[in-house]
Image (cartoon, helix red, strand yellow):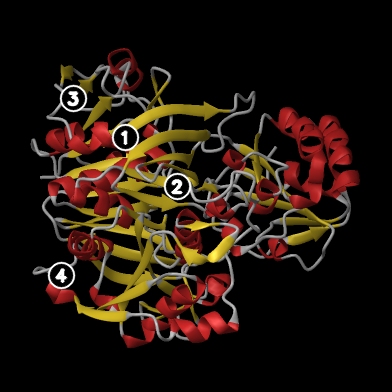
Amino acid sequence: MKILVPLKRVSDPDNANKVKVTGGKLDASGLEWKPNPFDEYAVEAALRLTENGTNTKARVGEVVVVTFGPKEAETTLRAALATGADKAIRIDALDDALDGDVVARALKALVDKEKPDLVLLGKQAVDGDSNQVGQLLAEYLGWPQATFAASIKSNADKALIVSREVDGGALNLKLTLPAVVSVDLRIVAPKSVTSIHTPATHTYPDGVRFAALMAIMAAKKKPMTEVKLADLVTDAATKIKYTGFELPPSRKAGIKVKTVAELVEKLKNEAKAL
Amino acid sequence: MTNILIIAELAEGKVKKSTHSAITFARSVGAPFSILVIGQGAKGAAADVAAFGAAKLLVCDDAYLVGPVCERFAPTVAEVAKKGFDVVVVTASSFGKDVAPRVAARIGAGYVPDISSVKVDGDKLVFRRPVFAGNAYANCELTTAIKVVSVRQSEFTPAEPSGGASPTEDVALAAKDPAADRVEFIGLETAKSERPDLGEAKVIVSGGRALKEKFAEVLDPLAALLGAAVGASRAACDAGYAPPELQVGQTGRVVAPRLYFAIGISGAIQHLAGMKGSKTIVAINKDADAPIFQVADYGLVADLFVAVPELITELKKAT
C-alpha cells in the first residue's frame, strides 16, 4: 500500500496559551515550531500499516510525507523520514498565503501525480483547529472519507475497516481504497492499527515512535523534492480572509474555598448555580 | 439578500437538539432561513422543527441515507444549497464537521468551521472563531457567493420555538456520488446512558485519571443528584476509566454548561479548550498548583475521594 501523509508544522501546542495578539495580528513568534500532533499520529498509523510490526525497519509499501511551507519546514519532513517514511515533498509556499481549501486543491493535484492508495492525515491542525482538509480533499478527489479515525484495520490492503470516534459512540465504516482517512488521537493506542503484515498477537508501544540517532542520520539521504505551489494550482486564491485576531475574554480570577460546605454555600448564594 | 439553509441532524427519527444552535445562528444573522431535514425518518422528524419560524422545511427521506455516511448526504445538500441559498449552516457536531466541508468543496463554496459568533457588517458576514485551542479568536470572511459554516453548539444558545407551522416541501435525492459506493456503513456503537448528552447538559461532572477504577462509582451519584452529564479528561479515557465518547476537550466534545465540575483533572490546554466557556467552573484537586485552578471560579484543594461524597451530602442538605 502506498500512503501519502500531509504534515503541518504548528506553534508549540503545549504553550498555545502564550500566543499573543498585537494590533489585531496573531503573534506566535515566541513559540517553537512543532509537528502538528495529529499529523504525527497519522505518520505512525501509516508506518504501522506498511510494515511487519516485529521488524519496523523494513517497509512493506511506501509512505510519502508532504508539507507546505518555506525551506525551514523541511525539518518537519526530515523528522518523519527519520521515523520511517520513504520520501518527502515540500510544496513551496508562504504560510500566510494558504487556507485549507488551497491546501486541499494542491494536495488533489499531488495525489493525481503520486497515486497513493490512501491519504492519511491528522483530523485537524492545532493552530487553526479547522478540521477540514481531509474532507475537502476527499470531495475534490471523489474518494470516500473517514474522519476522526480511532482505529484502522486493513483488509488485504484493498479496503479499510475504520472506527470513527463520533459524538456519543463509535461509527464503523468499510472503505474501499483509494480513500482519505483523518485520524484522532487514539489511533496510536497499542492495538488501534491492524495491518495484514503484522502478526495479530503483536502489540505496539502506546504513542508515536521516536527516531534513533542512526535513523536521523540516514534520513538526510532520503529523497526530498520541492514543488512550487503554482505548479499544482493555477488559482491560489484563498476563500477565507482573516481580518483580525483577539485574545479571548479573560476569566475573572477565582477563589479557593477551604471546605466542601463553603463550596456549596458559594455555589448556592454567590454563583446561584444550584 | 441573505437566505440561509440549515442542515438538521437526525438521530433515531428525531431532529437532534444540536440543530437548535444552527437556528440561533440564522436568527442572529436576521435573515430568512429554511431547514433541510435529511435522513431516514426525515418525514416524521420534520415536525420537531416546524415551529421555529423557518420559511420552508425541505424534507428528504430515503432509505439510501444510512449512517450518517456523508458521501450519501452531501450531493443532496449541495443541490438544495444551489437553489437560492447563500449561507449553509450546520452545527459543528461530528456529523456537521464531517459533511459540511464535503458540501463546500462540492459547490466551490468557502467554509468556516466552528464559529462562535457572527456579525452582520453591511452586506458582509464576519465570523468569529476560536483558534489555538481557544487561546485566541479570529475574525474572518468568505469571498465565495455561497458560504458554508459550522457553529459551536456551546456558543449558540439553543433556539426556542417561535410558534406557527412552517410549510414543508419534499426534496428528491440528488444524483449519487460514486464515492458512496466505496463506503459501507457497518454500524454505530452507542453506549446507552441515563445521563443527558454532554452537548445539552446544564451541569457537567467531569473526572480525570485520579479517579482510577472508581470513576463511575464516585461520579455517578453526584451526576445523578445534579441531573448532570458525565465528562472525562483525555487521561481518564486513555487509561480506560471512562469511555472515549465522554472526553471533553480539543478531541472530544466542546461544552459550555451553566456549571462544570472538574474533579481530579489537572487542566491541560487541550482539556481547557473544551470547557473554558462554562459559566461557573468548580475544580477539586489534590495538587494546589494544578493549572485547572487558574480557570476555576471555585477551587477546592482536597482528596476527591473524601470531598465528592461530602459534596453529595452537603448538596442534599442545601437543596
Give the residue at the far top of this rendering.
B44
**What is the C-alpha distance between the residues marked 1 and 4?**
28 Å
Q: Chain letter of disc 1?
A: B
Q: Which of marks 1 and 2 is in front?
A: 1
The answer to the question of whether label 1 and label 3 lie on touching residues, with beta carbons closer than 8 A, is no
At label 2, the amino acid type is Phe
Q: Mark 2: which secondary structure?
A: strand
A156 to the left or right of B304:
left
* Marking on residue A232: 4
* Quadrant of the rendering where the C terminus of chain A is positioned: top right
**What is the C-alpha distance between the residues marked 2 and 4?**
27 Å
Location of mark 1 (residue): B183
What x and y, as percent, mark residue A124?
41, 58
A16 to the left or right of B6:
right
Q: Are marks 3 and 2 on the same chain?
A: no
Q: Which of marks 2 and 4 is nearer the N terminus?
A: 2
* Quadrant of the rendering where the N terminus of chain A is positioned: bottom left
Location of mark 2 (residue): A148
**What is the C-alpha distance between the residues marked 1 and 3?**
32 Å
**What is the C-alpha distance between the residues marked 3 and 2?**
33 Å
Location of mark 3 (residue): B56
Q: Nearer the viewer, mark 1 or mark 3?
A: 1
At label 3, the amino acid type is Lys
